[in-house]
Image (tube, grey):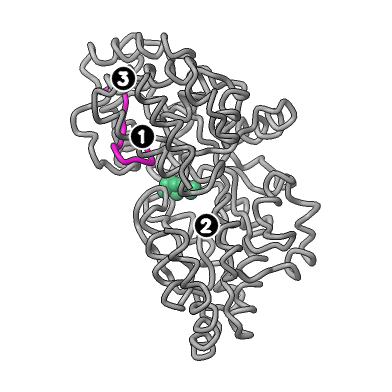
Amino acid sequence: MRNIFRKKALVIAASVTLLSLSASAAEVEVLHYWTSGGEARSVAELKKMLEAKGDKWKDFAVSGGGGENAMTVLKSRVVSGNPPTAAQIKGPSIQEWGAEGVLANVDDTAKAGKWDSLLPPVVANVMKYQGHYVAAPVNVHRVNWMWVNPEVFKKAGASVPKTWDEFDAAANKLEKAGFIAVAHGGQPWQDFTVFESIVLGVGGADFYKKAFVKLDQTALKSPTMEKAFKTLRMVRKHVDKGFAGRDWNLATQMVINGKAGMQFMGDWAKGEFTAANKKPGVDFLCVDAPGTANAFTFNIDSFVMFNLNTPDAKKGQADLASAIMSPAFQEVFNLNKGSIPARLDVKMDKFDDCAKKSAADFVATSKKGTLVPSIAHGMAVPAAIAGAMQDVVTEFFNSDMDSKAAVEKLALAAKSK
Ligand code: GAL
């Protein structure tokens, strides 16, 4: 798959230049997949800021949580020699795109804005290809959250679980009281999002890193990984019948409207709660997924710039990059998105307690060595490998595969190229 893409890259490089010369002036086409209520409010802030700089925002939204659809559309646009000005791409995929020779660098903007001193290295490194900035970070999302409706818990006489055993007990109580315990959307990336939190909770951060960052075969086939699959089977038991294909934000709605008690999702879910005027600590709780209190699974959204050799495109990219990194944008965008600023110097006083906890945990876990990249959100390993592993988790979720067979399959998937 990648090879086919590579062969086409030369053709692309030639045609990109030709096409971009005829592109209309100062139009900044931005591909993203932020189409839910909270997401749309967030991206609207970027549009506003870019237009304030005199540029024209051309929206290129491709719906589909987690961005899989968006990446498919992006590939075909690039292959046909017509990349957008910028696209929402993140993690190791930035390196893969860099290797195709289709990215533009924004070093001048980064230098003028002192990005190197403002961004923590864990963020800055992801934004660079061969030492040059090719992307601008908008945020840091935390993935290992569990979203709770406290009213539902109260009515069921259940307490918020801190371990997976307690989780099972609480979920049983919720169901006995007539609620859906876990709001889940059966899409592969959502299954994988739940599973990575389970692996972190069951195995701890060191185990997570061995299995999901180093792709260590022994860890992937270990009894600990088997236990994680057994835990996923237990969680699966607490999902309602209508889960298949459900979008993540509809699952969040189930927690918001009191149909369900919990959801495992990154803090983009908070954007849905706040868009619905719900207050953290009152209408909903953000708690660590069971067993993950001392760790942080990070997911950094960023915009990557494509190589379009016109002065207009360059101006648009510089404007976009500097808007993204401005403290004003980092604040307003993340207030809406549920995440925290990528810059460490942005004041947190307007943020809620969930974001404040996230910001404090980001720094603390980075010191402790328990800050880990989200595999489900493209932060840990190349997309092809993550995709193959994700498929195993989804197959397990939707069949009666036992955990022994699952670890063997997962370890094999981790070897895919
Ligand atoms: C994540 C992305 C978030 C959020 C979510 C659902 O991968 O980083 O910004 O949009 O998917 O679409």
Identify residue for label 3. 402
Q: Are marks 1 and 2 in contact (CB under 8 Å)?
A: no
Name which residue lies at 49% across and 77% down: 12
Which residue is tagged 2? Answer: 89
Q: How many neighbours does mark 3 have within 10 angstroms: few (below 14), some (14-19), or many (20 or more)?
A: few
Residue labelled with disc 1? 392
Amino acid type of the residue tagged 1 in the rendering: Val
Mark with earlier residue (2, 3):
2
The N terminus, quarter of image: bottom left
Nearer to the camera, 149 or 224: 224
- Where, by quadrant of the figure, is residue 97 drawn? bottom right
Comes first in the chain, label 1 or label 2: 2
Which dot, 2 or 3, sits closer to the camera? 3
Say which amino acid is labelled 2.
Ile
**Relative to 317, is 219 above or below?**
above
Q: Nearer the viewer, residue 271 or 213?
A: 213
Alpha carbon separation for disc pair 1 and 3:
12 Å
Instruction: Find out if the beta carbon at label 1 lies less than 8 Å from the nearest ligand 1 atom.
Output: no
Q: Nearer the viewer, residue 188 or 15?
A: 15
